[in-house]
Image: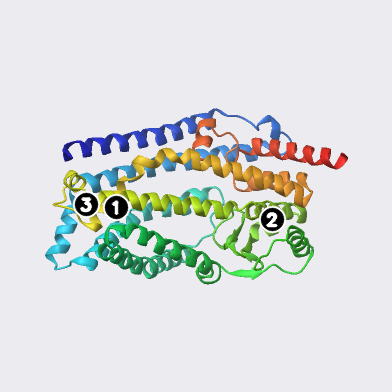
Amino acid sequence: MSSWVLPVFVVAFAIQYAVETGLLLLNLRHVSRARGVPPPLAGRVDDATAARSRAYTLANGRFSLAQGAFFTALTLAALLSGILPSLDGALAALGLDGAHRFVVFLVVLSLGFSAAGIPFAIIRTFVLEERFGFNHTTPRLWITDLLKGLLLQAAIGIPLLYATYGFMRFTGGLWWVWLFVFYTAVQLVLLWLYPTFIAPLFNRFQPLPEGALRERLEALARAAGFAHRGLFVMDASRRSGHSNAYFTGIFRPRIVLFDTLVERMSVDEAASVLAHEIGHYTARHVHRRLALSLAATFVLLFALSLLVPWPPLYAAFGFGGPSLHAALALVSLGGGAFVFWLAPFAAGLSRRHEYEADRYAVRLARAPEALETALVRLNGENLSNLHPHPWYSAWHYSHPVLVERIAAIQRAAAAERAVAAG
């Protein structure tokens, strides 16, 4: 019966790689043939910025092609070469069994893939980002961040793995339900801890200084009835020249502005960005995405519960029989080939939420022109792609293309003016 499992996996894996690589190549060809500035952005984006945006997009895309090919080959090698059963046998020979074997097997696998990714991370930071003037990270800071990340992953991940084994091994046939409840609780706790305990391990957060910007943002939050835990500026410029803003937390989030954004944007532009983020919380986008993420986890755990006792899965990849750590490893490495087609649906939902948040920002901040200029500024400062292929953006983009987004803002502003005119 296991004879068909491996061919089905290989076909699914090949389809995923062909689709994702084909879309990336299509986008690169589309961008390489584009010239100048899209007509709706004429006068807002200069030719030099458009040219740098194309160059940055092409450099990132070509780098992603190489990285994708490498990790595709690495994943196939891990799954098909017999190295995973050999690792399992080596751990058994060392006398490891039960929870310890479960944890060590998965930690070694994770560390192997993490180590393989380090050269790509170095090239991206110190070659690609450096070439376009974005990298502000020193080698010492980069290594410090890497070590902090590994220690944090170990501090959180290893206990979670032991807990996962306990639920899978000792809670009966409905272990996946109990594990889902546990994972949900852990995720909520981590979301609560992140702003005040985890994020400060990597960045400094200072209260937004008194002044016109703080007054405007606080007035905006009051007008929206938006409860928050403070306005903070993050020292993002220590690592990168990219600019952004975000909220962190679920119930009373922190408002975090990159220091690069505070330095470069006008008060009205920053206020429009904040109004957009408030729109996400007012419309419960964050909570709805969290609910969808948890629902996906529930389905994944149910599918895992069906695969764990299924001998053909293990026989197809060289294992002697069912084991909990082998099931998790196989699903983690190969499961994406069967669900990757969900990506455009998730991206489409995210773009819909962005349009809704923009409409809310137009109503709340009453400065649609500032919102437009803020988005143009962010796009230019981050060298975002001005000429994405429609298929590629539909599959991957969580935010609307700039031209489409500005057109939607202008329609929303016209609708607001028509309502006001009565």
102 relative position to 386: left or right: left
Q: Residue at x 54, y 27 (%)?
A: 33
Q: Is residue 399 visible?
A: no
Residue 288 visible in the current orientation: yes
| Quarter occupied by the N terminus | top left
Rounded to the nearest angstrom, the CA distance separating label 3 from label 1 is 8 Å
Residue at 54% across / 60% down in the picture? 239
Question: Tag on residue 274?
Answer: 2
Q: Which residue is pictured at 58% across the width and 33% down the height?
A: 387
Task: Kindly identify which residue carries mark 1.
Answer: 305
Q: CA distance from mark 1 to mark 2?
A: 43 Å
Number of marks = 3
Checking the image for residue 309, the label placed there is 3
x and y percentages locating residue 76 in the rendered image:
26, 43
**Which tag, 1 or 2, sits closer to the chain's start?**
2
Location of residue 368 (image quadrant) = top right
Estimate the x, y position of residue 218 in percent, counting from the top left.
Answer: 75, 63
Does 14 sit above or below residue 80? above
* Mark 3 surroundings within 10 Å by alpha-carbon count, few (fewer than 14), some (14 through 19), many (20 or more): some
- Secondary element at image label 3: loop
Q: Amino acid at mark 1?
A: Ser
- The reply, left or right, for residue 372 in relation to residue 81 is right
- Between 205 and 298, which is closer to the camera in this rendering? 298
